[in-house]
Image: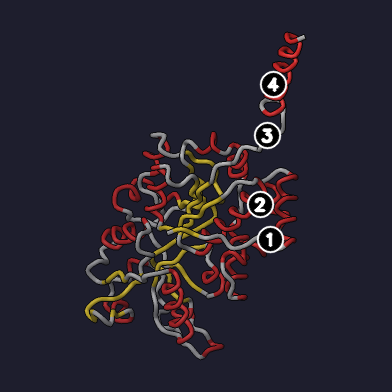
Amino acid sequence: MKKILIVLLLLVIVLGLGVGGCGGPQEPEAKPTIVIGDNNWGSAHFLAEMQEIIIEHGYGYPVELIAGKTVILWEATIAGDVDVDPEVWRPNMADWDKAISGGELIDLAIINEDNWQSLFVVPTYMIEGDASRGIDPMTPELHSVDQLSDPKYKELFADPENPGKGRIFNCLPGWECELINQRQLKAYGLDEHYNLVNPGSQEALFANLIKAYENGEPYITYLWGPTWIAGKLDLTRLEEPAYNEQDWETDNSCAYPSADIHVVAHPSFPEKAPDVTEMYESWYMETAYFNEALAYMDETGGEPFDAALWFLKEREEVWTKFVPDDIAENVKEAVASGMVTPPTTAE
């Protein structure tokens, strides 16, 4: 009898271990945090915040946004401190080929390829006038960068800090195009005639242009699209030598190439989050959609998070193509319930 009791006791213990171990209900394994680079311009802020909502509320991953400038986030992704950099302008990355071919980064997708940028953008009223505002043409013959060395244009764009030179507003500090524009100005022989002015921030760059535009003043600046301001104002890009790879690689002595925008990731990311990797590999949005979101922000005074929520509600036909149906339903329910809150972005 005693032996039977011992056997029964051992059997209970074994069964108990089975229920509590392999055979019983277990807590689901926590998903790793996905770190997304949040670049410092409007379309990138909007994109990062929309993807944060989809990944967190659709796929169930915790997400952290890391704010930074182009080069810093590029290097952080190579180092593995950032998992995904979701809006990389390929022409601006001097070491693109080295990083991709060398396996430091993986190229997940092209978001779109219908974007542009130029150091030589002027208000169209300078060339054509604006009868509705009583503005006569100031530079009716100006159409090309090679004319800018003419003293009359240098005087028109005079730098208040250095009247002997003209002034052109550069792209943002920390962006690769800041250095490209310096090389380009030199290659065109215009560095002797013009200073490149650091705008400080995107907000300041746009605010200065709007002020000059509203006052009907002469102005020349770096700009790019998609931006709400490029769609709102009537602007003209001065002609440059057509892009060719040899001149671009040598000294940037030609126009910027059409800007392919890519999603890049650290090589470890597909294994870390294979389902989210599939989403990124499917992601494609025409510039017009970015312009819509940026225009919404401008018209409503909203933040990128507000534009992200608006886009998720109003443009379901776009983003639902990138995710499975069940993930899309999770996101829709979260957005409709009001449980989605602005993320905290780390610097």
- Graded by Cα atoms within 10 Å as few (under 14), some (14 to 19) or many (20 or more), the crowding at tag 1 reads few
For the residue labelled by badge 4, is the local secondary structure a helix, a strand or a loop? helix
C-alpha gap between disc 3 and disc 4: 19 Å
Give the labeled residue for mark 4: 13
Seen as rendered, the residue at the extreme front is 2
C-alpha gap between disc 1 and disc 2: 9 Å
C-alpha gap between disc 4 and disc 1: 45 Å
Q: Specify which label sits upstream in the sequence, 4 or 1.
A: 4
Q: Specify which label sits upstream in the sequence, 1 or 2.
A: 2
Question: Which quarter of the figure has residue 17?
Answer: top right
Q: Specify which label sits upstream in the sequence, 2 or 4.
A: 4
Q: Tell which tag, 3 or 4, sits nearer the viewer.
A: 4
Q: Is residue 139 left or right of residue 337?
A: left
Do the CB atoms of the residues marked 1 and 2 lie less than 8 Å apart? yes
For the residue labelled by badge 3, is the local secondary structure a helix, a strand or a loop? loop
Do the CB atoms of the residues marked 3 and 4 lie less than 8 Å apart? no
Give the labeled residue for mark 2: 57
In depth, the one of 292 and 60 nearer the eye is 60
Give the labeled residue for mark 1: 339
For the residue labelled by badge 1, is the local secondary structure a helix, a strand or a loop? loop
C-alpha gap between disc 2 and disc 4: 41 Å
C-alpha gap between disc 3 and disc 2: 22 Å
At 62% across and 70% down in the image, what residue appears? Answer: 296
For the residue labelled by badge 2, is the local secondary structure a helix, a strand or a loop? helix
Residue 261 at least partly seen: no
At 40% across and 44% down in the image, what residue appears? Answer: 96
Do the CB atoms of the residues marked 4 and 1 lie less than 8 Å apart? no
